Every structure is written in structure tokens, then in C-alpha cells.
Image: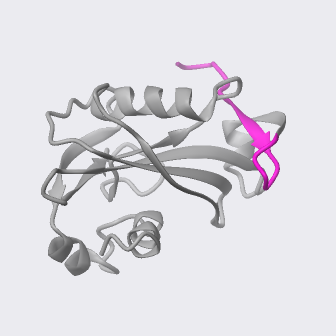
Amino acid sequence: MIGVTEFFPIVTPSGEVVGKASRQDCHNGSHILHPVVHLHVFSSRGELYLQRRALHKGLLPGYWDTAVGGHVSYGETIMQALAREVQEEIGITDYVPVHLETYRYDSSRESEMVHVYKAIYDGPFFWNDGEVMDGRFWSKDELRDAMEKGILTPNLEMELQRFGII
């Protein structure tokens, strides 16, 4: 929505909400800690579904990324944000999320408290919000081959290693 300011919760390292800040303020290098959700979707064969970020995205356009990744809006719970992002980005509702870990991710642009989940789902997928331009399942060999070649987002590469996916 043009002209509408989106607000994210400001959280402590333990996850306690202590305020709110605009998307712009959270992404301007201020390192205001704010929560996000990720969902890794595996097929029943063990392949990992990735989405390709739309070319109009301001950050890492065209890169392959986690099946679902998005910000928690101010006033939302983590699970509400996960359900919303899953519906927006891959259009599914019939999945069972399993929490893997919550960790802090810092980049030059922002600081995120990342709540990571996984689920098993074989499809179909529906890209609803214009943020995804492609998606498919990847084998472990394909993921290993893509590492450090500017194909996958840096955060995805870190999570692939962190969670032993590759």
C-alpha cells in the first residue's frame, strides 16, 4: 500500500517486545532488532523447496531463498506472522510447522531475530503476492553446487549449513 507506514515490533535479544519502529527505520543500518519468520519446506523425498525472489525486490532480487521469509508486523504473534507469510508467499494452509531455532542475524542493513520452522509438504504452491517469481524443489546435491556462487541468498546459505540441510 502506497503511503502506509509498516511497523515492526522492536524486541530484546530474549524476544520481549519493547516498542515499534517503521520498516524504513529497521532497514537503514540502525540495527533495531526486529522479528522475522522463515519456513523451510521439504518434500516427502527430502528435497528443499526454494522460492526465487522477484526482480523488483529491493534486496537480493532474483536470488533463490527460503520458501517463506517475512517480517512480523507490530501486534502480530510469531505464529500469526508465519501463517500470513506462508499464505502470501506460497499459498498453502495445510502444513504443520516445527520450530527449529530462533537466532539473531545481523547484516550491514539490519538486525533480525529469526524464528525458523520446517514443514513437509509436496505441493502445490501458489505465489500470491508478487514477491516470488519462481519456485521449485532442490536436491541436496543441487544445493551444495549452488553454494557461494551468487545464486542463493547469504542468509539461506548460512541456514543450510547451520541446520545441516546440506
Q: Position of residue 128 (x, y in %)?
A: 29, 26
What residue do we see at 41% from left, 40% from top?
Answer: 97
* Left or right, residue 149 beside residue 109: left
* Left or right, residue 63 beside residue 24: left
* Quadrant the C terminus occupies: bottom left
Identify the image's colour scheme: rainbow, by chain, secondary structure or one colour: one colour
* Left or right, residue 25 beside residue 141: right
What residue do we see at 33% from left, 70% from top?
Answer: 165
Q: Position of residue 151 (x, y in %)?
A: 29, 68
Q: Quadrant of residue 78?
A: top right
- Vertical relation: 40 (above or below) 141: above
* Left or right, residue 34 beside residue 157: right
Magenta region: 1-16
- Vertical relation: 135 (above or below) 155: above
- Vertical relation: 140 (above or below) 11: below
Q: Position of residue 135 (x, y in %)?
A: 20, 47
Q: Quadrant of residue 159?
A: bottom left
State the residue in front, 105 or 151.
105
What residue do we see at 48% from left, 34% from top?
Answer: 82
Query: Is residue 4 highlighted in magenta?
Result: yes
Query: Is residue 147 highlighted in magenta?
Result: no
Q: Position of residue 100 (x, y in %)?
A: 49, 56
Q: Main secondary structure of the magenta part?
A: loop
